[in-house]
């Protein structure tokens, strides 16, 4: 998968830490990068892959896995390639963090679960528009 990758923050070849920022369905890499100004990530390389057609996979994460294939596996591979590129710039796995929003959060959690290592750090934001707090 040939994934466009946007970067911001500290240049990868100078950074000690990287934050992989994975956007949600219908959004893009620019969108997820825009929230960095609200985070304490001044010393991070920010890396945001762009999903093809603004979606990582076609159906809900609740759908049977085979319904989201081959897009789901291609998206996991794209995230893997981002991690490889970060490591090639000298950043160790324990200094790679993940942040995902909505569909990107699901992908980040799936990737870190399938590729468990000493330390994967992630923050996930999942928002359901049909959820309402009970008051």
Image (spheres, helix red, strand yellow):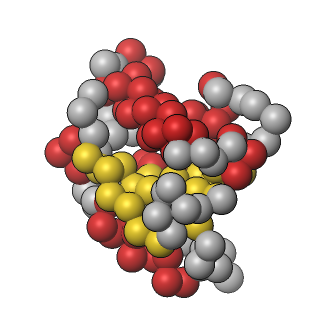
For image coordinates 63% across by 48% down, the residue present is 91
Residue 72, by quadrant, is top left
Q: Residue furthest right?
A: 118
Does 86 appear above or below 135? Answer: above
Residue nearer the viewer, 25 or 45: 45
* Image position, residue 46 (x, y; %): 48, 63
For image coordinates 47% across by 72% down, the residue present is 9
* Image position, residue 74 (x, y; %): 35, 25
Q: Is residue 27 left or right of residue 114?
A: left
Does 104 appear above or below 2? Answer: below
Quarter of the image with the N terminus is: top left
Q: Residue furthest left?
A: 53
Q: Is residue 20 visible?
A: yes
Q: Residue furthest top?
A: 66
Residue 112, by quadrant, is top right
Q: Is residue 117 left or right of residue 5?
A: right
Residue nearer the viewer, 1 or 111: 1
* Number of marks present in the image shown: 0
Q: Is residue 81 left or right of residue 110?
A: left
Quarter of the image with the C terminus is: bottom right
For image coordinates 43% across by 48% down, the residue present is 103
* Image position, residue 87 (x, y; %): 57, 40
């Amino acid at each position: 998968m040939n994934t466009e990758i946007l970067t911001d923050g500290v240049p990868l070849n100078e950074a000690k830490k990287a934050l992989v920022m994975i956007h949600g369905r219908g959004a893009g890499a620019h969108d997820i990068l825009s929230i960095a100004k609200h985070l304490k990530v001044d010393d991070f390389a920010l890396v945001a892959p762009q999903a093809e057609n603004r979606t990582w996979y076609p159906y809900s994460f609740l759908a049977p896995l085979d319904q989201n294939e081959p897009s789901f596996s291609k998206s996991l591979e794209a995230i893997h390639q981002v991690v490889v590129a970060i490591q090639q710039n000298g950043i160790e796995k324990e200094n790679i963090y993940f942040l995902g929003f909505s569909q990107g959060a699901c992908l980040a959690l799936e990737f870190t679960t399938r590729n468990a290592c000493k330390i994967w750090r992630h923050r996930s934001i999942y928002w359901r528009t049909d959820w309402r707090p009970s008051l």
